[in-house]
Image (cartoon, rainbow, N blue to C red):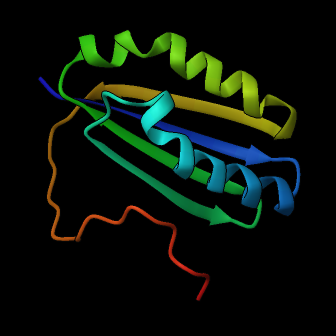
């Protein structure tokens, strides 16, 4: 059973948000190697929503230590964070895989 984890992060400033979102994209394979699907959505100038999908609860649980290490590294730049995890009920995707951050529109 696939599971998802989403986190909503509010950064201290716009520069913190830009820096940490770019860092997240560069370090995805280091801190979230078992994630099958990763998306980061900028929800405001200082906030983002991150969604990770894993093959199983065991794969998500296996990365708890890496998630903590990542969060400890960004904590000085974060005002607030909360998240939810649960079983995946539906997924539809027609987007191409993007390995780089798109330029600002």
Instruction: Pick whichever, 82 or 14, lies toward us.
Output: 14
- Dividing the picture into quadrants, the one containing residue 57 is top left
The residue positioned 88% from the left and 56% from the top of the image is: 13
User: In the image, residue 11 lies at what x, y percent?
Assistant: 79, 47
Up-down: is 9 above or below 58?
A: below
Q: Is residue 67 above or below residue 42?
A: above
Q: Residue 76: x, y in percent?
A: 87, 32
Question: Quarter holding the N terminus?
Answer: top left
Count of labels shown? 0
Horizontally, is 18 left or right of 27 in the view?
A: right
Residue shown at the point (39%, 61%) measured from the top left: 99
Up the image or down, 8 lies above or below 101; here it is: above
Residue nearest the observer in this picture, 12 or 65 = 65
Q: Quadrant of residue 33?
A: top left
Residue located 14% across and 59% down the image? 92
Residue 86 coordinates in the image, percent (x, y): 31, 25
Image side of residue 92 versus residue 28, left or right: left
The quadrant in which residue 44 appears is: bottom right
Q: Identify the residue at image location x=64%, y=53%.
A: 21
Percent position of residue 83, x then y: 53, 30
Image quarter where the C terminus lies is bottom right
């Amino acid at each position: 059973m696939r599971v998802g984890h989403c986190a909503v992060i509010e950064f201290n400033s716009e520069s913190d948000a830009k820096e940490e979102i770019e860092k997240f994209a560069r370090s995805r394979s280091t801190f979230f190697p078992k994630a099958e699907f990763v998306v980061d959505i900028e929800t405001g100038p200082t906030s983002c929503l991150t969604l990770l999908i894993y093959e199983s609860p065991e794969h998500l649980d296996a990365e708890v230590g890496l998630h903590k290490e990542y969060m400890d590294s960004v904590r000085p730049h974060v005002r607030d964070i909360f998240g939810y995890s649960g079983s995946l009920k539906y997924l539809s995707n027609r987007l191409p895989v993007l390995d780089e951050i798109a330029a600002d529109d």
